[in-house]
C-alpha cells in the first residue's frame, strides 16, 4: 500500500497548484512489514518523490505501517496521530502541520 501511495497517488496530488506553494522536503520512515523509506522534495518544480533516504530533509515523519494505512484511508487524521504519539515528527513542525493536506 505505501509503495502505491508514493509511486502513483502522491505524484498526481503534487501536480496540484496548491502544493507548489509548499517549499520543503519530507522523509518518511514507515516501519512494519508494509513499510519503507520514502522522500518527498517540494523545494523544486516539479516535485520529486522517491524511495530511499534524503540528505537533510526539512521534516522527518516516523510512523508504524498500520497507522500510516489508517491515515491513507482517511480513518486517522495526522494531527490526532501526532497527539496520540502514533506519528512522530523531527524537524520543521510547520511542514508537519501541512501533512494532512498532502496525504489526503
Image: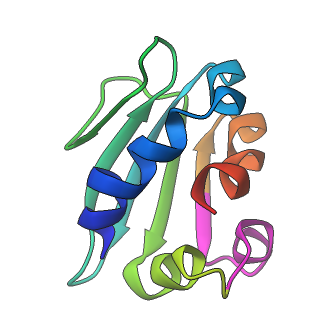
Q: Position of residue 66 (x, y in %)?
A: 44, 88
Question: Quick one: 3 or 63, which is closer to the camera?
Answer: 3
| Range shown magenta | 76-88
User: Is 84 a magenta residue?
Assistant: yes
Task: Look at 52% across and 83% down and name the residue there.
Answer: 67
Instruction: Depth check: give the residue in front, 5 or 43.
Output: 5
Which of these two is toward me, 97 or 18?
Answer: 18
Image spot of residue 20 (x, y percent)? 63, 21
Q: Residue 99 placed where, x, y %?
A: 66, 51
Left or right of 1? Residue 46 is right
Q: Is residue 10 above or below residue 44?
A: below
Question: Would you identify the image quadrant in which residue 41 lies?
Answer: top left
| Colour pattern | rainbow
Residue 39 located left or right of residue 96: left
Quadrant (top left, top right, bottom left, bottom right) of the C terminus: bottom right
Above or below 49: residue 104: below
Q: Quadrant of residue 53?
A: top left
Decide: is 25 above or below 44. Answer: below
Q: Quadrant of the N terminus?
A: bottom left
Q: Residue at x 61, y 34 (%)?
A: 16
Tell whether 55 sits left or right of 100: left
Q: Is residue 85 left or right of residue 46?
A: right
Name which residue lies at 74% across and 81% down. Answer: 84
Residue 87 at x, y = what percent? 60, 69
User: Is residue 94 a member of the stretch shown in magenta?
Assistant: no
Amino acid at each position: 500500500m505505501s509503495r502505491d501511495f508514493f509511486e502513483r497517488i502522491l505524484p498526481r496530488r503534487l501536480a496540484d497548484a496548491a502544493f507548489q506553494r509548499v517549499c520543503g522536503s519530507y522523509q518518511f520512515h514507515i516501519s512494519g512489514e508494509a513499510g519503507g523509506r520514502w522522500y518527498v522534495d517540494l523545494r523544486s518544480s516539479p516535485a520529486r518523490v522517491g524511495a530511499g533516504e534524503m540528505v537533510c530533509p526539512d521534516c522527518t515523519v516516523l510512523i508504524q505501517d498500520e497507522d500510516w494505512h489508517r491515515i491513507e484511508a482517511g480513518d486517522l487524521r495526522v494531527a490526532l496521530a501526532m497527539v496520540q504519539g502514533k506519528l512522530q515528527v523531527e524537524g520543521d513542525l510547520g511542514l508537519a502541520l501541512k501533512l494532512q493536506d498532502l496525504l489526503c
